[in-house]
Image (cartoon, rainbow, N blue to C red):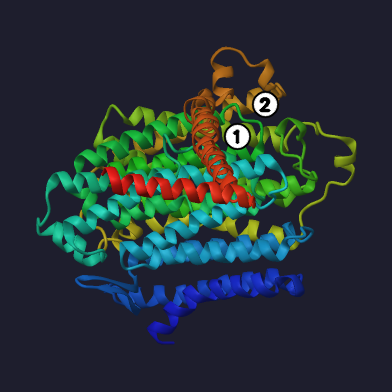
Amino acid sequence: MNQSALFLIILLAPLAGFVLNGLFGKKLHALAGWIGSGAVLMSFICSLFLFQRIAADSTPLLFKLFQWLNVGNFQIDLSFQADRLSSVMLLVVTGVGFLIHVYSIAYMHHDEGFYKFFAYLNLFIFSMLLLVLGSNFVVMFFGWEGVGLCSYLLIGFWFNNEAYGKAARKAFVMNRIGDLGLLIGLFLIYFQFGTFEYSQVFEKVETGAYRPEILTAICLSLFIGATGKSAQIPLFTWLPDAMAGPTPVSALIHAATMVTAGIYMVVRCNVLFNYSPITRDVILYTGLLTSVVAALIGLKQNDIKKVLAYSTVSQLGLMFVALGCGAYSAALFHVVTHAFFKALLFLGSGSVIHALHGEQDIRNMGGLKKQLPITYWTFLIGTLAITGFPLFSGFFSKDEILLSLYDRSHWLYPIGLGSAFITAFYMFRLLFVTFHGKFRGAEEQQAHMHESPALMSVPLIILAVLSILGGLINLPHYTGNIAQGLHHWLSPVLADQPEHHHGFSTEMMFAALAVAGMLLALFLTRKKYLSDAVVPEADAEMTGMGKLIGQKFLIDEAYDAGFVQTTEHLSDGLHTWSDKKIIDGLVQQSGKLTGLMGGLVSKVQSGNIEWYLLLMVLAMAAILGVNLFI
């Protein structure tokens, strides 16, 4: 298969699935799920072929579809490129995306919008592929906006629920704030470099053809865009609310697609960020703050999906920490491993919700280990991976980030280690409260509880295997010649990557510190939630700092009071005074004036002949008077 065909199939297969399901899905019924899944599978298979070609030759593969715009010196091509960075992202997006599609066939089979759901999923995948494969900033931007649109459609999929509709609107608005920053960055890129093509922009930066202050403004603007898509402080509150969508949507947004877009964009533009140390510092401290704050909030969440949502925000914070340290390969490594175990955890939570007929509060669960064995063991593997249990994927990728943080600042390393400890604590808490102990739900739920069907269980098993073996793609230095596979794979794409120069004993010491923190969290949570059988308290029972954490540090309330209510009051004021009293008043008064003038004129046309004769005489007298005296 030639290169052009591979590009076209990868991009157009999901788009074709969207068109088919969107136009004919209602008539196709159950086939809609298989069409949507098959379309993504085709993209995945072609992505494997593309990956194989790039492995044989590191030269980027280019494909120009047509010239999009040509106005004077302003030219934009609808063109695509596949290199070692985009090839990894292609496999993650299409591979994990395919498993989520298959899972959704069973999870959503009862929903009346079944065909529409798969149409949206396919459009989501297409938009993400457009973002990843674009060879210039404009094509990336269209994929970026397409992902945002699809997230709005999928988060608010059950739009009859007003709260879900508000969650979708919140995600859309907060992403638009970030996208404004990205758009400003693109304008500055064209202003400074006169082109949107990656290769040309990066080449000019490396030759020094830029003004440092403009480059810093570009990088800060691009990072603002990334904070929106990848849910960093202050634009992170939309992501937990995105749990309003069906669980497969949560897995797709949080694991393989939307939230990784910001990470991918920064890694793609690593040449720019390498020459802007100010921006890298901003990224580092923002990521570290986000990781800690989200992890703390996750400690007091009782909704199974909300716990995982805040863990996603925290893990994204760690990825930005790596980006801020210049460890781009470590950030992408965690993107890949996180895609495996976070998709597994979300789909596992969906299996629990499916078994309990919609129940999401972990306080009403417990003792599910026996009734849901596949779900339990796969969820356990996902938990061990995210907490950094030795030899699981998260152990290697998180350790790489923490080591990069230590190299960047010895003082910041304990904060990153503390964030990892908190993550382990709330994840083991979630595992023990949900699957161990006694069942605390309704008897009817317990009577009808059953393991999920094969279409849901098989993706869980595959993701569990990937969560165990995913760390092999970038083993640490002490493993010898097979170490740093992903790091070396990305070397043609990344301009400057820091190298760790630590001895075997030093690296093992850092790994031991991380494992010790994880084991301490395991011991504490096991004693509290398993041995002592403590049930998490309700929000009303919380006090002190626990209450503040349970209230999510009142960040949503602050945004609501500072922005939402202020905007609504301003809108109400403008509606009352500007719209009703000024604009409507002018329209009404002009109408009254017209009526008054019409009334006066209508008296002239009264139909009375004597009145007409009198007016004629008066007019003639006026004319004679003017002629005689003027």
- Which quadrant of the view contains residue 83? bottom left
Q: Is residue 473 above or below residue 17?
A: above
Q: Position of residue 200 (x, y in %)?
A: 20, 66
Q: In this image, 1 relative to 99: left or right?
A: left
Question: Disc 2 or 1, which lies upstream in sequence?
Answer: 1
Query: Mark 2: few, some, or many residues within 10 Å (few <14, many ≥20)?
Result: many
- Which quadrant of the view contains residue 21? bottom right
Residue farthest toward the bottom in the current orientation of the protein: 1
Q: Is residue 333 above or below residue 55?
A: above
Q: Amino acid at mark 2?
A: Tyr
Residue farthest toward the left in the current orientation of the protein: 208
- Which quadrant of the view contains residue 411? top left
Nearest the camera: 267 or 440?
267
Q: Is residue 542 above or below residue 490?
A: above
Q: Are the residues at dot 2 and dot 1 in contact (C-beta closer than 8 Å)?
A: yes
Q: Position of residue 503 (x, y in %)?
A: 25, 42
Q: Which residue is mark 2?
A: 529
Q: Which residue is mark 1?
A: 428
Q: Position of residue 124 (x, y in %)?
A: 54, 61
Nearest the camera: 435 or 347?
347
Question: The N terminus lies in which quarter of the figure?
Answer: bottom left
Q: Position of residue 601 (x, y in %)?
A: 54, 46
Nearest the camera: 267 or 130?
130
Question: The C terminus lies in which quarter of the figure?
Answer: top left
Secondary structure under badge 1? helix
Residue at 49% x, 79% y is 9
Secondary structure under badge 2? helix
Q: Amino acid at mark 1?
A: Phe
Q: In this image, 137 relative to 612: left or right?
A: left
| Residue 341 visible (yes or no) | no
Q: CA distance from mark 2 to mark 1?
A: 9 Å
